[in-house]
Amino acid sequence: MSKGRSLSTSKPPTRAAPAKTLLAEVRQFVLEARRQTARLVDAGLTLLYWQIGDRIRREILSEKRGGYGERIVSALGEQLESEFGRGFSEKSLRHMIRFAETFPDRPIVSTLSRQLAWSHFMEIIYLKNDLQRSFYAELCRMERWSVRLLRSRIQSMLYERTALSKKPEHLIEKELKALRDEDRLTPDLVFRDPYVLDFLGLRDTYSEKDLESALLREIESFLLELGHGFAFVERQKRITLDGDDYYIDLLFYHRRLRRLVVIELKIGDFKPADAGQIELYLRWLDRHDRQEGEEKPLGLILCAGKKRETVEVLELEPRGIHVAEYLTELPPRDLLEKRLHDAVARARLRIEERVAREAPARSGPDRRKKSRK
């Protein structure tokens, strides 16, 4: 018997694959709609809480009597809680009043509420001063921090570690206004001092190579500590000048600043030669590696000890060079707080002294003109 053509026993193609694709797309529609609805509800509740807090606050202020205010909040909370639940208790009303006190401008609250939930505001409204609150609110809005990340940033004293916090208050207000109105980020909002690298697990003695390897091994945590917008580019980038090879420890790119950022690691104290080394790298990158539309590269020297007077005399920041210490272990909060507050006080004193020195030079020609008259 001759062999005939074998008959196929395979099943006809099913529509399972298209059905799965369709299901996935429809599920995505539903989930996205739920997320958008949740955001709208959150924003609406936040504005409601502000409105309630503002109204009660104005009522209390109009009477100008503390005892009356206590009684009215207590009575109002009791009535509202019985009708609408615990979210409107006396304690909740006091949070709302605090909210309206610390964020008195409704348009600003309206803008922030598109990204920040009520839980975010609860972390912010009890901070010490307006500048702190504005800093965390605006960065949280722009970088879309979770409540957990916001809490972590506050606990690590991020504001006090930025270069911004060491400026006079009127300059801080100016930069925060530019951030709020134009989303304009400056290096003073980006760079910190010190950087907390306790996630590396380094103990006792280690080399610069050990530090570099540990940072790359924990690159996700390092990027989180550097801040939003940093992207890793290259390790030990080679540059050649007059036949000599030089190697950049770590090269990053900051998307919002549109700048390359060189990071040099030093396990000892900062030395003036370190500034010359990184300035060479920055000039080479500016000439050979900067792309159209990018700003000039910036440098960050991360060292175990800063030697503040040496750094101050060199006046590195106008040259795009920042020097910061790193900590491989997080000190007790009160110790870190004192250290940072002392640093802020010293920095502001230096600025005041510089302004005082420059004032006679600026006013000199004017005085001579007046004397001629």
Image (cartoon, helix red, strand yellow):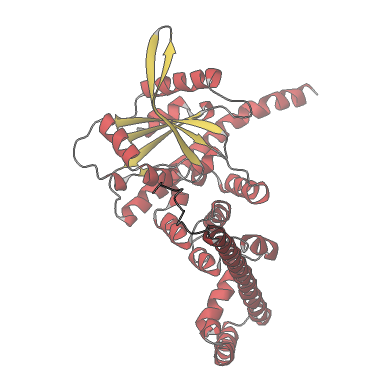
Please tell me whether residue 285 is drawn above or below residue 130 in the rendered image.
Answer: above
Q: Give the quarter of the image for residue 259.
A: top right
Q: How many labels sit on residues? A: 0
Residue at far top of view: 242
Residue 213: image location, x then y, percent: 30, 35
Please tell me whether residue 283 is drawn above or below residue 61 in the rendered image.
Answer: above
Residue at far left of view: 204
The residue depicted at 63 percent of the width and 29 percent of the height is 293
* Res. 306 in view: no
Q: Toward the viewer: 24 or 157? A: 24
Residue 106: image location, x then y, percent: 68, 66
Please tell me whether residue 50 is drawn above or below residue 206 in the rendered image.
Answer: below
* Res. 294 in view: yes
Please tell me whether residue 234 is drawn above or below residue 154 in the rendered image.
Answer: above
Q: Give the quarter of the image for residue 359.
A: top right
Q: Toward the viewer: 303 or 312? A: 303
Q: Quadrant of the C terminus?
A: top right
The residue depicted at 72 percent of the width and 23 percent of the height is 368
Residue at far front of view: 1
Residue 95: image location, x then y, percent: 53, 75
Q: Toward the viewer: 86 or 26? A: 26
Q: Toward the viewer: 177 or 66? A: 177
Residue 333: image location, x then y, percent: 33, 56
Q: Give the quarter of the image for residue 323.
A: top left
